[in-house]
Image: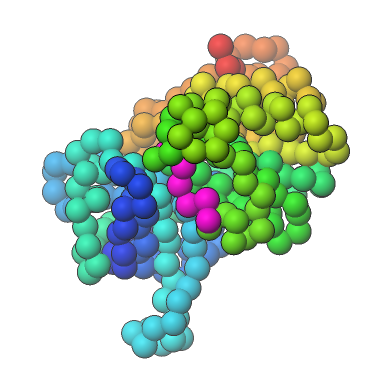
C-alpha cells in the first residue's frame, strides 16, 4: 500500500547511522519480519527513485489525534551512504514522506528448532530486531552482531531487552571479540549442540560465509539480501540475482524485491 507518513523522530544512534520512527496506517502491523518499505524522500525529480529499508520495528503509542486513541508507527534503521540517505537524515519531527509498504517476502518463523540464531551487522540488524520480537515469544534467541568497528554495532540494548542473548564482535577489536562475526558463530556451533536455525542479514560476503556454515552443520538457514532497487515490486528488474533451479541446476533468475529479500540459502547461487 502507498501512504503519506509523518516523521515522529529521527535520531543518530551511531556516527552516520540513524533510527527513524514515522506514522503508518494500522494495517502495517500485519507486516511479516523481513519485509521492507520503499521511501520517497521528497516530492521532486531529484532524487528520482525511492530508497528501500528493512522494517526495524512496528507498534503503536497513545495519542489524542486518532479516533482509537493510538497511533501506529513504523521504524527504519539506516546508514547515510549517498544523497538520498543524507536528505533523509536531515528530516525532523513533522516532516512528511511518501511510503510503499510492506513489500517483499519475509522470514518463515515456524521452524521447530530449539534455538534461533540471528546473524547481522550494521544496518543488517534492522530486519533482525523485528524478527527477534516475534521469535522471542516462543523460542530461545541468540544474536551474533558484527561490524568493522564499534560504530557498526547498533541497538544491542534493544535486543537484550527482548531477552535475546547477544554476542558482539568487531574486525578491529574495539568492541566485543576481535574477528569476523562468522568466526564467532562457527565457534559457538562447535561447542553447543542441539537443533538450531539461522537467520542472517548483511553484506553478501558475510551471508555467503553464513550459508557455508549452515551447509557444514546441516542447519536450516534464511538470508535477507541487501540490493539496490528502483521499483520494489519486480517491474524494473534492477535487483535480479541468480538462484538455483533444483530440478536441473540451471540458473534461476529472481528479483530480490519480489521473490525476496528473504531466501533459504539453498535456493541461491553463491559463486
Total marks shown come to 0
Residue 227: percent from left, percent from top? 42, 31
Image point 53% across, 58% down: which residue?
A: 158
The vertical placement of 215 against 168, above or below, is above
Q: Is residue 61 above or below residue 106?
A: below
Residue 20, relative to residue 256: is it above or below? below
Do we see residue 86 in this rendering? yes
Residue 151 drawn above or below residue 43:
above
Residue 198 belongs to magenta span: no
- The residue that appears at 34% across and 85% down in the rendered structure is 65
- Look at the image and tell me in which quarter the C terminus lies: top right
Q: Residue 252: x and y, percent?
A: 57, 19
Residue 91 appears left or right of 140: left
**Residue 40, image x and y in percent?**
26, 50
Residue at figure coordinates x 71%, y 27% from the top left: 187
Judge from the rendering whether residue 169 lies leftward or rightward of residue 73; answer left or right. Answer: right
The image quarter containing residue 71 is: bottom left
Range shown magenta: 152-157
Query: Residue 250 placed where, x, y %?
Result: 62, 11
**66, 83: nearer the viewer:** 83
The extreme right residue here reads: 194
Q: Which color mode does the image show?
A: rainbow
Q: Residue at position x 46%, y 42% from top?
A: 153
**Quarter of the picture holding the N terminus:** bottom left
Amino acid at each position: 500500500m502507498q501512504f503519506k507518513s509523518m516523521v515522529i523522530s529521527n535520531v543518530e544512534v551511531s556516527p552516520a547511522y540513524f533510527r527513524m520512527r514515522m506514522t503508518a496506517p494500522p494495517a502495517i502491523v500485519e507486516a511479516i519480519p523481513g519485509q521492507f518499505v520503499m521511501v520517497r524522500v521528497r516530492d521532486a525529480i531529484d532524487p528520482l527513485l525511492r530508497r528501500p529499508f528493512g522494517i526495524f520495528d512496528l507498534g503503536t503509542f497513545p495519542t489524542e489525534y486518532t479516533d482509537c486513541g493510538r497511533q501506529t508507527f513504523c521504524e527504519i534503521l539506516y546508514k547515510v551512504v549517498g544523497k538520498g540517505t543524507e536528505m533523509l537524515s536531515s528530516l525532523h519531527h513533522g516532516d512528511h514522506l511518501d511510503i510503499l509498504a510492506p513489500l517483499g517476502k519475509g522470514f518463515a518463523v515456524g521452524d521447530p528448532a530449539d534455538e534461533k540464531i540471528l546473524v547481522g551487522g550494521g544496518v543488517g540488524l534492522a530486519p533482525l530486531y523485528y524478527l527477534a520480537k516475534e521469535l522471542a515469544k516462543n523460542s530461545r534467541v541468540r544474536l551474533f552482531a558484527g561490524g568493522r568497528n564499534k560504530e557498526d554495532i547498533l541497538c544491542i540494548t534493544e535486543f537484550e531487552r527482548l531477552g535475546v542473548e547477544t554476542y558482539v564482535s568487531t574486525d578491529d577489536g574495539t568492541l566485543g571479540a576481535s574477528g569476523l562475526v562468522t568466526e564467532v558463530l562457527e565457534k559457538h556451533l562447535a561447542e553447543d549442540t542441539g537443533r538450531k536455525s539461522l537467520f542472517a542479514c548483511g553484506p553478501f560476503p558475510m551471508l555467503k560465509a553464513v550459508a557455508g556454515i549452515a551447509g557444514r552443520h546441516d542447519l536450516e538457514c534464511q538470508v535477507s539480501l541487501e540490493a539496490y532497487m528502483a521499483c520494489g515490486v519486480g517491474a524494473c528488474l534492477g535487483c535480479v540475482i541468480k538462484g538455483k533451479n533444483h530440478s536441473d541446476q540451471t540458473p534461476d533468475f529472481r528479483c530480490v524485491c519480489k521473490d525476496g529479500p528473504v531466501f533459504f540459502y539453498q535456493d541461491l547461487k553463491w559463486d
